[in-house]
Image: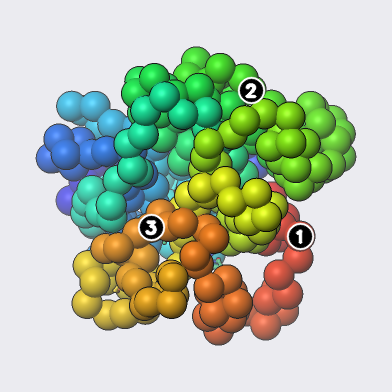
Amino acid sequence: MYKVLKREQIVPNIHLLAIESSSVHQNARAGEFVVVRADERGERIPLNLVDWNKDSVSMVFMEVGTSTSKLASLKPGDEIATLAGPLGKPTEEVQGKKIACIGGCYGIGALLPVIRMFKEKGNHVTTIIEARSEFLLYWQDKLREYSDEFQEITRDGTKGHKGHINDVLVDYIKKNNVDMVYVQGCTYLTYLCSEITRPSGIKTIVGLNPIMVDATGMCGVCRVIVAGETKFGCVDGPEFDGHQVDWDNLIARRKIYINEEISSLSFYECERYG
Ligand SMILES: Cc1cc2nc3c(=O)[nH]c(=O)nc-3n(C[C@H](O)[C@H](O)[C@H](O)COP(=O)(O)OP(=O)(O)OC[C@H]3O[C@@H](n4cnc5c(N)ncnc54)[C@H](O)[C@@H]3O)c2cc1C
Ligand code: FES
């Protein structure tokens, strides 16, 4: 069992969870994830690592269903049944590049270790976070610490640029010599950013979140098609080149598991919850 050190709601529906680390922190690297299980009867769910030290590992999660609701009810001193990781391939380390990093919903938290690593490697980091409204944006100060430029977008215009990521990203890549775009968030955000950068050929790395079961490469549930080949999100990813992902296949596969009532992929999937 693994002790909960902290669980707090950061903004509505989005929580920080810090768990006492046994050994997970020792090998943790930016872009990796853990599998957690709230209790012995629970499902194993993957969550990105957002921070770690010798005492704890932290995740940011959005409350969307049974397992994340169980996690959202945890208190310091409670215990969870599973904390497995770090899993997946870490973010590729690059140096001396101009990188635009984009995050939405839980992906805002997931950006933190990645932009920290990019900054430490001497890259120029522009961080762009987006949400439906100002009250759903979070961790601006933490992210600014590792960002050369920082932008906020809200659909209702309550903070930063009013509108959508497409307006901002199209404009940003037109005016700046961007080497790479990195995206964390819902499937539609990762898809959209990949389509925006496709015409210019700017390398675009996306953190995918296919449904996972074992997260060890055994069950095949997380398979995605990348550059025409079947890859497993858990062991070959979860980050891939967004221009090589077969998005039609990924979106169709995700819809299989999603409740019919909420299955239409609206502009932002996470608006259903946020
Ligand atoms: C590598 C990886 C890293 C992830 N990192 C994070 C993270 O840092 N924070 C976070 O909040 N979530 C993350 N996710 C998604 C998270 O695992 C799911 O939201 C979680 O499994 C939902 O469990 P649940 O029982 O609460 O919801 P369920 O009852 O299983 O599902 C409720 C609804 O949530 C949606 N949903 C379920 N699974 C996913 C999924 N994999 N992706 C998107 N929507 C889903 C569906 O619309 C479903 O109808 C990650 C997924 C992967 C594969
Ligand atoms: S989750 Fe089973 S192979 Fe990836």
Residue 53 position, x and y percent, is 24, 27
Q: Say which label, 3 or 1, has the lower sequence index.
A: 3
Instruction: Determine contact: label 2, label 3, CB under 8 Å.
Output: no
Distance between the alpha carbons at the discs numbered 2 and 1: 23 Å
Q: Is residue 43 above or below residue 77?
A: below
Three-letter amino acid code at the position of disc 2: Phe
Q: Nearer the viewer, mark 2 or mark 1?
A: 2
Mark 3 crowdedness (10 Å alpha carbons): few <14, some 14-19, many ≥20: many
> Mark 3 — residue?
238
Distance between the alpha carbons at the discs numbered 3 and 1: 22 Å
Helix, strand or loop at disc 2?
strand
Let me know if residue 181 appears in the view.
yes
For image coordinates 67% across by 29% down, the residue present is 176
For image coordinates 57% across by 46% down, the residue present is 202
Q: How many marks?
A: 3
Three-letter amino acid code at the position of disc 1: Phe
Let me know if residue 105 appears in the view.
no
Is the CB of the residue bearing disc 3 within 8 angstroms of ligand 1? yes
| Colouring method of the image | rainbow
> Mark 1 — residue?
267
For image coordinates 30% across by 45% down, the residue present is 90
Number of the label disc, if any, that sits on residue 150: 2
Q: Is residue 199 above or below residue 127?
A: below
Taking 4 as reference, is 145 left or right? right
